[in-house]
Amino acid sequence: MGKRTTNWGESACISELQGIKNKRMGHWGPAIFSNDTSADIKDEFNSLFNKETPIDKIKEQIISSFKEGENLEENTDLWLSLSFLMWQVGYEDDEVKKKAFKIIDNGIDLKVWKESDADKQTLSKRRKKLSELRDKISNHNPQPRKPRIRKPPKSKFNKGDCYAYPLKNGNYTGIVILEEILDPEYYFVLIAQTNVNLNRLPTLDEIIESDILIEQPHQGLNSNHRKSISSYTNSKYKEIVKTFEKIGTVEIKDDFSKNYLSFGAAPWNFLVDRANEYLVDGKESPKVKWKTKNYIKMKNTQKKNSIWNIFKKKKK
């Protein structure tokens, strides 16, 4: 995880209000985690800890990501933060504690703050925070924090499910679920929007034989078209999903579990808005064809039925 980008306007306001003249990158207060580096270390440590990563592996990764040079003066936030976090989870590490003690007892951290033009009031507050930290890490934590194991979200769709939903003119369009990503940290469902636009519910064959809706390119892109396929999160989806009617299920031939975000991510209202924009409002779609069945593993019966349906339509 890289270091956070400081919002200088916001930091300047906060510093002025708190009387902090500290010019070090991303410090907004005297507390141990009141700076960008320590906050990032805390986020990464807790994320790994909650995944039950061994502490020695977490330590190794944190040091690899955040250590700058070999001098303690360059790494005060690293060792102080790491010592606090290890104490919180009840893990004793002599190397980390010794470095934290040296930074506090030898006045290294306060010296760095002085050189960064911290005022007397801020230095006094920082000294108090350092003393509190030293008292903590000098003793074993009687109530160490346990990992907060996150459970994967519940599945909302099955890969290959085909749905229809109403457009604002009363017609129906169709979509295909290409992938559902269930992870403790996030949720995404990859959906392909078709160009189906019927005054009734479409059949499964009609969805299979449809084209993927093609959108105009986003500003700045060099390509002249974009398939209407996006990844959607699990927020603000319930009202939209209420309108879905399942038409059937197909077998998706590709695995999108690794590249689902390459299609872009979008809020759920985009799914409906895009369909209405092109299929109802008449926004011009690029003259490009891309068959929905390019994503489907076609069975022999499906192929025969689809060809026979086309033949019957032409005969009529």
Image (cartoon, helix red, strand yellow):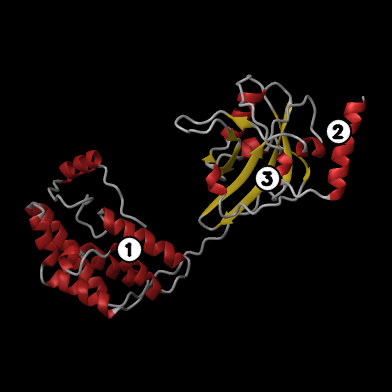
Q: CA distance from mark 3 to mark 1?
A: 37 Å
Q: Earlier in the sequence, mark 3 or mark 1?
A: 1
Say which quarter of the image contains residue 15. Answer: top left
Which residue matches tag 3? 177
Mark 1 or 2, closer to the camera: 2
> Viewer-proximal residue, 81 or 161?
161
Q: Earlier in the sequence, mark 2 or mark 3?
A: 3
Q: CA distance from mark 1 to mark 2?
A: 59 Å
Which residue matches tag 1? 65
> Viewer-proximal residue, 116 or 86?
116
Q: Earlier in the sequence, mark 1 or mark 2?
A: 1
Q: CA distance from mark 2 to mark 3?
A: 24 Å
Badge 2: residue crowd in 10 Å (few <14, some 14–19, many ≥20): few
At which x and y percent is residue 268?
58, 37
**Location of the C terminus (image quadrant):** top right
At x 15%, y 65%, the residue is 73
Secondary element at image label 3: strand
Which residue matches tag 2? 310
Secondary element at image label 2: helix
Under mark 1, the amino acid is Ser
Q: Is 197 located above or below residue 91 in the figure?
A: above
Under mark 3, the amino acid is Ile
123 lies left or right of 223: left
Say which quarter of the image contains residue 143. Answer: bottom left
Q: Is 257 located above or below residue 65 in the figure?
A: above
> Viewer-proximal residue, 180 or 251?
251
